[in-house]
Image (tube, coloured by chain):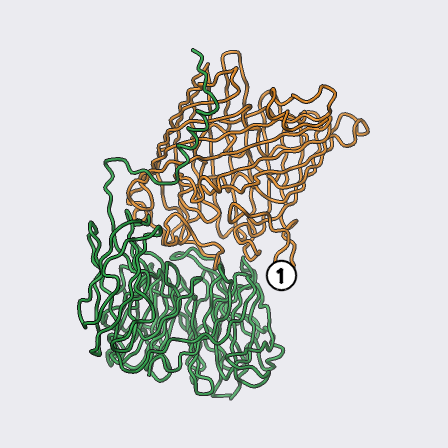
């Protein structure tokens, strides 16, 4: 008998009858924080309190082969105006990270669908709303609170996506098709077909090759062709994206170690605009104390801002930008994990500081000094991570890559 | 040490932190300012209430609406009354009052103050014995949201709509070939112009239908393609030549390219068979368009200049006599020799804002402003007096409240009205000024279009004056919106 209520109220994910083939792993998490950005597009410092990344996740496995990954995100309620983020941009927000859609992921997967017919290889398919097979982990499942500037260069998410996967030994190859349009509001669903009758689902594709040359090192390289990501009806151009990364995460007896380096490049409109990113981050946790550091150098487009200087025009009116800026940022974080291992709840107060510089790199009329009154960038945040049950799963890893479905990726999350 | 945190404490912490109200720690000053939202510059009958109530907004630190702030209104000149004399701002930080003009004719004013607010606002209105007439919307033609509509060229009762990646759409708006009128435009034909290898698609932006007085032909339509651009630095896009001999079946026959630059607005000296084109960072080009046009006609460019040198990003051009005027986003308003394109005067005369569109008329010129430059919005219409030599001299400006860009300016054929379109902020749309005093046009009519109007093309059809305006994407969606402005300026 299936009883979700029993699962939610009972022990760690597995309070179903022993003979049940269904395993349900729920979790919830949110981060209450106060952030101060200085300087800001208002010139002066801005301070805000927000509940960010409030999310409920369900990993559901049926037997050994079928699974579902569901992530519900309430940022549309708790931070509809976005989160102050140095260098943040995308989906019509500038210097703020946009709220995600309410249904962040709803992916269904079938793993090793040929069983032993393909020998030791594993063939899988996944479909639903979620991440395309491209790039690195969602920043929500990584150590820092503040999203990196490269979020829209390094991940493709909240799309209607179909993924085929083939894993042989430690290597997995993925191919995915999806709709190119990114969301424009928390309530948006992927646009399957535009008003003029053209299909948006399937107008974009991505491939990713990942592997584990040695445990626990994971490397990936991926490429995507995304049609008109910032113009929902489809009038925008192509964004060709490339990503490569190496990731290490293990848990020795004394704690936990994590490191990741990535490179990303997005070329828009046949190379008329090109944006680069390099990022490295690391986290060490010993006992209850965790410290993390991130370096990032990322370029972003500068667009005309609206009456609200944290917003830019959507939908676009033409293929013009005001310039390209380069953000060189250092972020440090210290966290105390006050969780009671027996309590089921997670509570981890933290402080996180981002500092760095902004530069103009491509001409154009964008003026860093006129916009911010300074070429410096910085935020400071204090808050507490509030969790229920396990940590985040690694978003965007489905089928043969899903940790709860016997895949190759362990849990993650700050 | 082991800590236990009950669930209710976690929940309470979440709720406590969930407030969306910005916090302002002690050292940060609280600064309140007043801004006009609606009602500025109206015309009304003596001793009668204005059509639009006055509305202001109180802002905290420049952006956040400030609720529960007291706003006081007082008639300063002209007599009349305003109700209420005092009001409290609502959740949007706004307060409203109704202004009944005094008996005298002429300009009257109301002042607005708020305790603790440094700035004072002044509303002006004009009392006149003839009723005010606002532009009347007579037709709305939806355009596919393939970015939408950017500009329209109207001539001989035909409207050539530039519909971006949907190319050009030709409407009968009074020509008669398809029974159309301004109130009921009828689609005659359409053509998706070539991409020509420019990233982003056809991107049809602007046009000019060439009536050749030498050959008597009305054969060619020049179409500007606005490709990707890094504004102020780079641009792309060609001029496409479309044969419209058969209006029901237009055919693209050629193109003109300036390497490393993109086409923007046009003007023509039709008698000399010269097409003038703004090419953004490529400056201004004069192009010989006589004879038959076919294929790559880039070698027909007879002259090209970058008037601002390294600070060149030309938006538009317009000829008046033997002078060609150019509006440069970076370096301001220029006068060039219409034949050689040599500089006659002007330039580096609009430093605080980016310059947008222009219009010239005997002895006067007007130019718009765009975007935000060093924190200053493009909310000004610049006024230029023109010497007999053609050289422009700054003669003041009109500041338009609550807009971020003056996207287009034009003067009606009878010279009586200055028409502007505006984008961004709270009150974009259509503005109509009288030119009783060309150095100081007075606002006679205004229509707020929340999506903003990208351009406005003037035309007289069957004795009535119309504005063919391009409504931006967003909100109600992109559309050709046609306003009758007959009588707005008596």
- Between B70 and B371, the one nearer to me in the picture: B70
- Residue A223: where, in percent of width, then height? 60, 41
The secondary element bearing badge 1 is classed as: loop
Which residue, given by chain and number where applicable, does mark 1 sit on? A196
Quarter of the image with the N terminus of chain B is: top left
Q: Colour of chain A?
A: orange
Q: Can you name the residue that lies furthest to the right here?
A: A117
Q: Can you name the residue that lies furthest to the front here?
A: B84
Density class for disc 1 (Cα within 10 Å; few <14, some 14-19, many ≥20) is: few
The quarter of the displayed image where residue A379 is located? top left
Relative horizontal placement of residue A266, taking residue B26 as reference (left or right): right
Q: Is residue A260 above or below residue A96?
A: above
Relative horizontal placement of residue A400, taking residue B260 as reference (left or right): right
Q: Is residue A177 above or below residue B346?
A: above
**Is residue B7 something one can see in this rendering?**
yes
Quarter of the image with the C terminus of chain B is: bottom left
Relative horizontal placement of residue B140, taking residue B65 as reference (left or right): right
- Residue B274: where, in percent of width, then height? 44, 79
Q: Is residue A126 above or below residue B332?
A: above
Q: Is residue A139 above or below residue B239?
A: above
Chain whose colour in the figure is green: B
- Residue A335: where, in percent of width, then height? 42, 22
Q: Chain of mark 1?
A: A
For the image shown, how many numbered marks are present on the structure? 1
- Between B67 and A284, the one nearer to me in the picture: B67
The quarter of the displayed image where residue B265 is located? bottom left
The quarter of the displayed image where residue B484 is located? bottom left
- Between B221 and B214, the one nearer to me in the picture: B221
- Between B359 and A256, the one nearer to me in the picture: A256
- Residue B254: where, in percent of width, then height? 56, 72
**Is residue B322 something one can see in this rendering?**
no
């Amino acid at each position: 008998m299936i009883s979700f209520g029993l699962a939610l109220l009972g022990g760690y994910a597995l309070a179903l009858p022993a003979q049940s083939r269904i395993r349900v792993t729920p979790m919830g998490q949110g981060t209450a924080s106060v952030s101060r950005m200085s300087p800001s597009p208002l010139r002066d410092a801005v301070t805000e309190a927000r509940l960010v990344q409030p999310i409920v996740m369900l990993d559901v496995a049926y037997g050994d082969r079928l699974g579902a990954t569901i992530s519900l995100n309430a940022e549309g309620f708790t931070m509809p105006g976005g989160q102050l983020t140095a260098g943040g941009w995308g989906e019509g927000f500038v210097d703020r990270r946009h709220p995600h859609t309410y249904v962040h992921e709803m992916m269904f997967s079938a793993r090793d669908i040929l069983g032993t017919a393909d020998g030791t290889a594993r063939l899988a398919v996944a479909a639903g709303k979620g991440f395309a097979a491209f790039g690195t982990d969602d920043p929500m499942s990584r150590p820092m609170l503040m999203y990196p500037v490269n979020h829209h260069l390094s991940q493709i998410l909240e799309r209607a996506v179909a993924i085929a996967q083939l894993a042989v030994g430690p290597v997995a190859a993925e191919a995915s098709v999806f709709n190119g349009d990114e969301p424009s509001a928390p309530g948006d669903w992927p646009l399957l077909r535009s008003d003029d009758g053209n299909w948006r689902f399937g107008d974009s594709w991505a491939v990713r090759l990942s592997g584990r040359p040695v445990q626990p090192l994971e490397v990936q390289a991926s490429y995507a062709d995304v049609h008109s990501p910032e113009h929902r009806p489809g009038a925008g151009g192509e964004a060709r994206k490339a990503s490569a990364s190496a990731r290490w995460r293990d848990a020795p007896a004394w704690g936990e170690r994590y490191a990741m380096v990535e490179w990303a490049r997005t070329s828009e409109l046949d190379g008329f605009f090109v944006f680069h990113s390099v990022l490295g981050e690391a986290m060490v946790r010993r006992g209850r104390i965790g410290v993390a550091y991130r370096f990032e150098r990322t370029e972003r487009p500068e667009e005309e801002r609206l009456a609200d200087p944290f917003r830019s025009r959507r939908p676009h009116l033409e293929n013009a930008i005001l310039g390209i800026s380069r953000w060189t940022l250092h972020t440090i974080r210290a966290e105390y994990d006050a969780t009671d291992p027996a309590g089921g709840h997670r509570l981890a107060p933290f402080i996180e500081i981002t500092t760095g510089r902004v530069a103009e790199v491509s001409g154009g009329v964008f003026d860093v000094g006129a916009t911010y009154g300074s070429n410096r960038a910085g935020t400071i945040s204090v808050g507490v991570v509030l969790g229920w049950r396990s940590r985040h799963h690694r978003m965007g890893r489905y089928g043969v890559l899903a940790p709860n479905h016997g895949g190759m990726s362990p849990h993650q999350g700050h | 040490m082991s800590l236990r945190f009950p669930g209710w404490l976690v929940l309470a912490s979440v709720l406590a932190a969930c407030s969306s109200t910005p916090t302002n720690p002690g050292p940060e000053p609280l600064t309140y300012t007043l801004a006009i939202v609606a009602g500025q510059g109206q015309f009304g009958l003596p001793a009668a209430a204005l059509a639009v109530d006055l509305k202001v907004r109180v802002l905290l630190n420049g952006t956040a609406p400030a609720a529960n702030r007291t706003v006081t209104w007082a008639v300063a000149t002209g007599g009349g009354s305003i109700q209420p004399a005092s009001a409290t701002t609502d959740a949007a930080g706004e307060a409203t009052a109704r202004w009944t003009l005094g008996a005298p004719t002429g300009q009257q004013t109301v002042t607005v103050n708020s305790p603790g607010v440094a700035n004072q606002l002044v509303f002006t209105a004009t009392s006149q014995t003839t009723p005010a007439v606002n532009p009347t919307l007579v037709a709305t033609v939806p355009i596919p949201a393939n970015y939408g509509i950017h500009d329209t060229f109207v001539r001989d009762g035909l409207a050539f709509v530039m519909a971006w990646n949907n190319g050009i759409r030709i409407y009968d708006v009074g020509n008669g070939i398809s029974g159309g009128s301004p109130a009921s435009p009828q689609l005659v034909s359409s053509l998706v112009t070539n991409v020509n290898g420019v990233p982003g698609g056809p991107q049809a932006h602007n046009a000019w239908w060439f009536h050749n007085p030498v050959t008597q032909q009305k054969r060619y339509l020049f179409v500007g393609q606005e490709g990707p651009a890094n504004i102020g630095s780079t641009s792309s896009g060609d001029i496409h030549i479309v044969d419209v001999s058969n209006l029901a079946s237009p055919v693209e026959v050629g193109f003109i390219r300036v390497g490393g630059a993109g086409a923007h607005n046009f003007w023509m000296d039709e008698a000399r068979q010269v097409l003038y084109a703004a090419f953004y960072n490529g400056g201004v080009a004069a192009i010989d368009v006589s004879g038959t046009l076919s294929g790559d006609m880039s070698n027909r460019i007879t002259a090209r200049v970058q008037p601002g040198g390294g600070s060149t990003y030309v938006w538009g051009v317009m000829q008046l006599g033997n002078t060609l005027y150019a509006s440069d986003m970076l370096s301001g308003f220029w006068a060039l020799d219409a034949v050689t394109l040599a500089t006659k005067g002007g330039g580096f005369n609009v430093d605080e804002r980016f310059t947008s569109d222009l219009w010239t008329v005997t002895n006067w010129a007007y130019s718009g402003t765009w975007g935000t430059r060093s924190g200053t919005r493009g909310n000004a219409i610049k006024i230029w007096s023109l010497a007999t030599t053609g050289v422009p001299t700054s003669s003041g400006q009109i500041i338009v409240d609550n807009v971020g860009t003056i996207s287009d300016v034009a003067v009606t054929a009878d010279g009586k009205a200055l028409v502007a379109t505006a984008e961004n902020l709270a009150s974009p749309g259509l503005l109509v000024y009288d030119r009783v005093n060309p150095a100081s046009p007075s606002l006679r009519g205004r229509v707020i279009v929340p999506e903003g109007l990208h351009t406005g093309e003037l035309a007289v059809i069957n004795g009535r004056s119309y504005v063919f305006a391009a409504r931006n994407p967003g909100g109600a969606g992109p559309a050709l919106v046609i306003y009758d402005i007959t009588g707005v300026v008596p």
